[in-house]
């Protein structure tokens, strides 16, 4: 895979309460990904970038909320998230702790 494409596909980890629960219970990590990224691209990008084995990828397209502001209605951006299930023995540590 093109090294530049890896950084275009993976936009960063998605940190939320649900993502933390999923990470602890099911050995999954949640990433925000590009809107045109495929499951195969996401799998290759995670495997190459973090040197882990990926067992599966599920993708969710979350629509942005409509919010009321002082200037009328506004809309938050749509988000595409990838739930990456890691193989047994694989682990990604974002904090770099031991």
Image: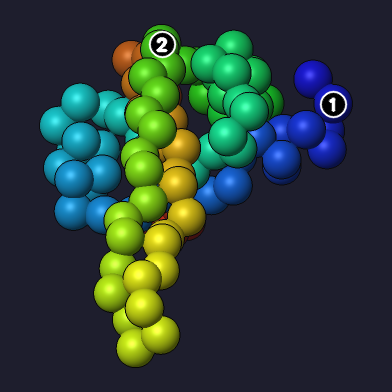
Residue displayed at 26% across by 44% down = 19
List x then y, in percent, for residue 7.
71, 42
In x, y percent, where is residue 88? Answer: 33, 15
Relative horizontal placement of residue 20, taking residue 7 as reference (left or right): left
Q: Which residue is mark 1?
A: 2
Measured in 3D between alpha carbons, the distance from the residue under mark 2 to the one under mark 1, in whole angstroms, is 22 Å
- Residue 93 placement, left or right of 3: left
- Compared with 75, 82 (above or below) is above
Left or right: residue 54 versus residue 70 is right
How many neighbours does mark 2 have within 10 angstroms: few (below 14), some (14-19), or many (20 or more)?
few
Taking depth in this image into account, of 89 and 76 the one nearest to the observer is: 76
Q: Residue 79 lies in what quarter of the image? A: top left
Instruction: Name the spot of residue 80 as percent of width and height, x first.
Output: 46, 37
Residue at point 59% right, 12% down? 40
Position of 56 relative to 48 (above/below): above
Which picture quadrant has residue 48? top right
Mark 1 residue element: loop
Q: Is residue 26 visible?
A: yes
For marks 2 and 1, give the one nearer the viewer: 1
Between 43 and 62, the one lying in front of the other is: 62
The quarter in which the N terminus is drawn is top right
Q: Which residue is mark 2?
A: 55
Does residue 29 lie above or below 18 as drawn?
above
């Amino acid at each position: 895979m093109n090294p530049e494409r890896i950084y275009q596909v993976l936009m960063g980890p998605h940190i939320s309460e649900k993502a933390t629960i999923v990470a602890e219970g099911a050995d999954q990590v949640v990433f925000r990904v590009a809107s045109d990224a495929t499951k195969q691209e996401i799998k290759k990008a995670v495997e190459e970038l973090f040197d882990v084995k990926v067992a599966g990828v599920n993708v969710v397209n979350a629509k942005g909320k409509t919010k009321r502001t002082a200037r009328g209605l506004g809309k938050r951006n749509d988000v595409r998230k990838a739930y990456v299930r890691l193989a047994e023995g694989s682990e990604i540590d974002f904090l770099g702790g031991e």
